[in-house]
Image (spheres, helix red, strand yellow):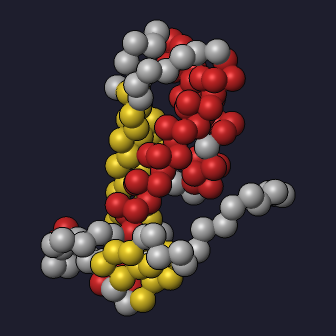
């Protein structure tokens, strides 16, 4: 697959799931903690799944808005909630799942469904990256 790269994000992690992360420009800095559900201490720190959820939610909403503009559909309010699950795979190692809940109030349900399907199949780079690798469920709230 050929990509004409317009922007490259760079971040460094030190200490794995119980360390910290920092973007190359210093805008993003966070402490990491293993969630209690995975045997860690949890607490006032983030984790890779929260970061992935935030990125996928923001990117997918942007993709929905992009498709809406292309189709002449005006979106007043929209939101996407992403739930990223992590756990052991039957084949060994760990895997993730993704569930996106899209809210498009005031948009006809059939049109809203078309927008999210097109965003997922054609536009969102997170959807492209996960396709065939991650079970992604998308629902219209």
Q: Residue at x 45, y 83 (%)?
A: 13
Above or below: residue 29 compared with residue 83: below
Q: Position of residue 50 (x, y in %)?
A: 35, 61
Choose between 130 and 46: the one closer to the eye: 46
Instruction: Specify the quadrant that holds the C terminus.
Output: top left
Instruction: Specify the quadrant that holds the N terminus.
Output: bottom right
Above or below: residue 17 compared with residue 9: below
Above or below: residue 57 compared with residue 139: below
Occupied quadrant, residue 122: top right
Q: Where is residue 55 in the image (x, y as percent from the top left)?
A: 47, 54
Q: Residue at x 60, y 68 (%)?
A: 9
Count up the numbered dots.
0
> Is residue 17 rendered to the left or right of residue 2?
left
Q: Position of residue 11 (x, y in %)?
A: 52, 76
Q: Residue at x 58, y 47 (%)?
A: 127
Occupied quadrant, residue 27: bottom left
In the rendered image, is residue 125 in sight?
yes
Choose between 88 and 84: the one closer to the eye: 84
Choose between 85 and 126: the one closer to the eye: 126
> Is residue 54 rendered to the left or right of residue 41?
right
Q: Residue at x 26, y 77 (%)?
A: 33
Choose between 106 and 93: the one closer to the eye: 106
In the rendered image, is residue 88 in sight?
no
Q: Position of residue 86 (x, y in %)?
A: 36, 63
């Amino acid at each position: 697959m050929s990509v004409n790269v317009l922007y490259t994000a760079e971040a460094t992690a030190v200490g794995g799931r119980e360390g910290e992360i920092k973007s190359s420009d210093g805008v993003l800095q966070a402490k990491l903690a293993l969630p209690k559900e995975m045997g860690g201490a949890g607490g006032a720190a983030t984790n890779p799944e929260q970061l992935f959820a935030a990125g996928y939610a923001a990117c997918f909403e942007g993709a929905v808005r992009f498709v809406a503009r292309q189709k002449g559909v005006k979106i007043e309010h929209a939101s996407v909630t992403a739930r990223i699950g992590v756990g052991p795979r039957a084949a060994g190692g760990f895997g993730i799942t993704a569930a996106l809940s899209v809210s498009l109030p005031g948009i006809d349900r059939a049109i809203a469904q078309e927008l999210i399907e097109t965003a997922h199949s054609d536009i969102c780079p997170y959807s492209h990256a996960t396709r065939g690798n991650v079970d992604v469920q998308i629902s219209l709230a």
